[in-house]
Image (cartoon, rainbow, N blue to C red):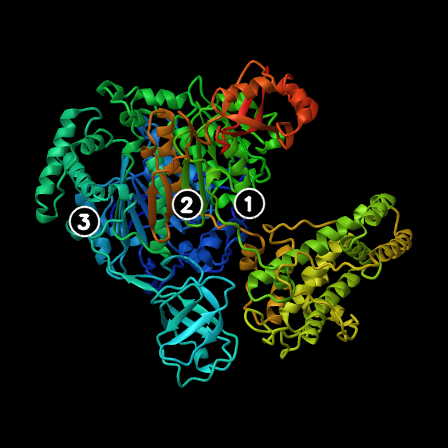
Amino acid sequence: MLPRKREGQGDVVEGETENNNNSNTIKYVSVTSPVKKHRISDTAAADSTVNDDTFAIRNSSGSSSVVEPAMAPGDSNHNDIDEDLHSRQLAVYGRETMRRLFASNVLVSGMQGLGAEIAKNLILAGVKSVTLHDEGVVELWDLSSNFVFSEDDVGKNRALASVQKLQELNNAVVICTLTTKLTKEQLSNFQAVVFTDISLEKAIEFNDYCHNHQPPISFIKSEVRGLFGTVFCDFGPEFTVFDVDGEEPHTGIIASISNDNPALVSCVDDERLEFQDGDLVVFSEVHGMMELNDGKPRKIKSARPYSFTLEEDTTAFGTYVKGGIVTQVKQPKVLNFKPLREALKEPGDFLLSDFAKFDRPLLLHIAFQALDKFISDFGRFPVAGSEEDAQKLASIAANINECLGEGKVEDINPKLLRQFAFGAKAVLNPMAAMFGGIVGQEVVKACSGKFHPLFQFFYFDSVESLPTEPLDPSDFKPLNSRYDAQISVFGSKLQKKLDDAKVFMVGSGALGCEFLKNLALMGVSCGSQGKLTITDDDVIEKSNLSRQFLFRDWNIGQAKSTVAASAAASINPRLKIEALQNRVGPETEGVFNDTFWEKLTVVINALDNVNARLYVDQRCLYFQKPLLESGTLGAKCNTQMVIPHLTENYGASRDPPEKQAPMCTVHSFPHNIDHCLTWARSEFEGLLEKTPAEVNAYLSNPVEYATSMKNAGDAQAKDNLERVLECLDREKCETFQDCITWARLRFEDYFVNRVKQLIFTFPEEAATSTGAPFWSAPKRFPHPLQFSAADTSHLNFIIAASILRAETFGISVPDWVKNPKMLSEAVDKVIVPDFQPREGVKIETDEKAASLSTASVDDAAVINELLLKLELCRNNLPSGFRMKPISFEKDDDTNYHMDLIAGLANMRARNYSIPEVDKLKAKFIAGRIIPAIATSTAMATGLVCLELYKVLDGAHKVEDYRNTFANLALPLFSMAEPVPPKVMKHRDMSWTVWDRWILKDNPTLRELIQWLKDKGLNAYSISYGSCLLFNSMFPRHKERLDKKVVDVAREIAKAELPPYRSHLDVVVACEDDDDNDIDIPQVSIYYG
């Protein structure tokens, strides 16, 4: 948990310790707080680290050069993880990886824009300590890319100037500084070291030390130079990766196994198998062929969607009878990294990002070496716009290339080297954000063994982001402004376009915070004509703080957009920003009206749901505005550019809908934990939210409620009334003992009686109408539970259920409920009636059934009887009695919501012999938590902002734009041109989804039809919304032809046209002269 820190209450404390290896001083700077609520418990030794070389986690005990004078506020002795804070990150990494991170010390050398981004991502991730190293001072130039610097910091040491703002991100991370020359011996204090501004000679020296150190120290060198970037990784001679992709092991439910060599294994067609040839799998729960249940990993081949062959002779095995689960075994992978001095000469395969630039990485490999030699020879970077310097760099590159012999590049590409030279000194914010995400993730891999490291070189460029028009050397000259670095790459004309941009950003969560930081540093909407409008209707929660880095713990409960806007303005005070709390949708078109949309330059989506994205996409399509779209899912991210007339729109292609389990599977035949959790969430909402709300609806207006139930007269109305009556009569609670009784009887009903009834109705030997076994895969035969107060999971269910039941009835909870002995005594008092299964009980088995309610002919009579009973109950209630419905809240671990859902799901899983899950995993599934980490978010926004340069320049072609899919876990980068929109043609006309035909001067229906006739189009139907204004088939419609279109819409469609709108849109169905339907654009009729 983050320490709570109030504004005005913190003070900066600096402590210095002498380094034992040399005379350098390490400075620890932290913001202390009078209130220290630690994220973790203080149960480990202060210097505890994970000492296990096989995980490539370095044990730094015994080293004394990084001394922590006292633990930072939020002591780093990480044993218990604050799941409220880190839930989204835990969903990506898991507990073990998080614990390894909490034990890792990391050095980040070079605190320009890239160093700050890397440090930010690591601090948010929660490593044990981050040491910032920089010998230089802040220059105005740095403000183009470093979000922690302000103009007041100019002249201060970069590392020292970074500490306070970085410490605010996570007070549980120790932040140290080094401000003098670094020696290789100091590197032994760290599990991973990152260099962002270092000569090749020094990098080789440091890397040799790290590579040969025991245990090896993970070494990362990364640079961003203008629109070019590189990463090099060396994690040692033998680095073990324990989880190469972070995906859950794939599983399958077995349908049959042959006695063959090799054996054929077939699985049920419930879900496609994701196995690949060469995978290792283990078998469990196989009946008959028991030999496979030995837990031994077996290799598969010939993997198909629903079958595979096993590299094993099963002819002598028992005959397969039924059942069985097959599960992938994930294998560790050992990587043999080369040190930098060897890898420079023999780089091996480069990690590609853009197949259109297949030969680019080797050229950039040479270019970055040439730049290092240029700086070494001349003591400076090439000057932006200097043809002489560009020629010198190209000459050095040519010499290096000649030395490569057969491996040399055929075309040294002087134009590209010129672009490289011009921008070499600049660290651009979008590049820093992108590479900060990549490098931050590589450090996590180095410290944990989670995900596959980058092996070993990655080169990237975005020269397409440059303005399309040639620039004069004078355009690159510095203006003594905070944007000089950016101007040295793009020129001052594009900077002016950035300044004056009118931007609409939808959402200010994780993506929104990163975007705001980027836009503020780039100077977008910072000019006199510019404006950035941001809207988000959400408020800040604790779980946001691990990645939505503009928020602090004292902002919890405040509006996201307001806090984010204020934080962005503190990064760049010139930012013209307005924060709104409106949801973007049809209901707010009065706020975001036509005038608002028409003035915009570009729209940036920072949303987390598809429906909102589709709405914004339609608005951008309508008003022909560029839309920059992105999204993340754990370590994966994607970006999509939606550019008027150049690309297809966001809604042109959609993912297939998520597969839903049939209702009968969830309620009676679950076969995985997801089914159990879906059922548990449904039961929670029914018992604690919907039924109490239904009770209150009845009590608030009994007469009206009774009338509506009678009018409905169906099975659903009957079910509602039965639940209300049950709540107010048979299961009404007046004391906490009543709540315990209710909970105990619920346990019996759910996990004993219902199962007894199910297996009475469908015994284990039952057959279907075709004679096949009823309990065949994927169905699992259940067994009733036997309640035991000695079983803590049984008692925990009782605690959670009784406490929440008490809350709905407003009953106070006694302290003794958490005393197992006293609780057991209270449970023992409950009289549990015997249960006898009944004949003729209908249990739904149809997978297509949408409801479990069964209608009957006498529903109306039963409803009347229930209403009479309810009336009697109501008369016995205290005056003003109401229940308190409970809405599910997953992110509060003290409210017992997840305790109950996990309890319900795990007891049900136990019924069906399904593996149980802990509360955290239950929260991920039942709470539908989207896995999220700061690194993929940073990368996505960096990529989008590289595209924003193109959008605001305004003259790029579709082939200049890039859509990206990336998976930092693999790592994989896939960039491609956007898909152009589909073109429709008629005669000499052509149009796309982006076109809208406009007809002004308030035309009549006849004039509209004639206007289309002149284009060779015969209009036979005109509609507004869902209402038909004209159709040639109806003779009476001809009477409307001489009326204004707007008047017909008001009269026939009852259109209420708001005063801010001066047009309406109609859909016209047309044919050509050969009676072929022609799909024409929407027609806008202007009447104002």
Mark 1 lies on residue: 542
Q: Nearer the viewer, mark 2 or mark 1?
A: 2
Q: Nearer the viewer, mark 3 or mark 1?
A: 1
Mark 3 lies on residue: 205
The residue at the far top in this view is 1001
Quadrant in the picture for the C terminus: top right
Q: For numbered disc 2, what is the local secondary structure?
A: strand
Q: Nearer the viewer, mark 2 or mark 3?
A: 2
Q: Nearer the viewer, residue 90 or 22?
A: 90
* Amino acid of disc 1: Lys
Mark 2 lies on residue: 637
Q: Earlier in the sequence, mark 2 or mark 1?
A: 1
Residue drawn at the location 59% of the way across and 76% of the way down: 773
Residue 710 in picture, x, y percent from top left: 84, 49
Residue 957 is left or right of residue 381, and the answer is right
Residue 151 in picture, x, y percent from top left: 38, 26
* Amino acid of disc 3: Glu
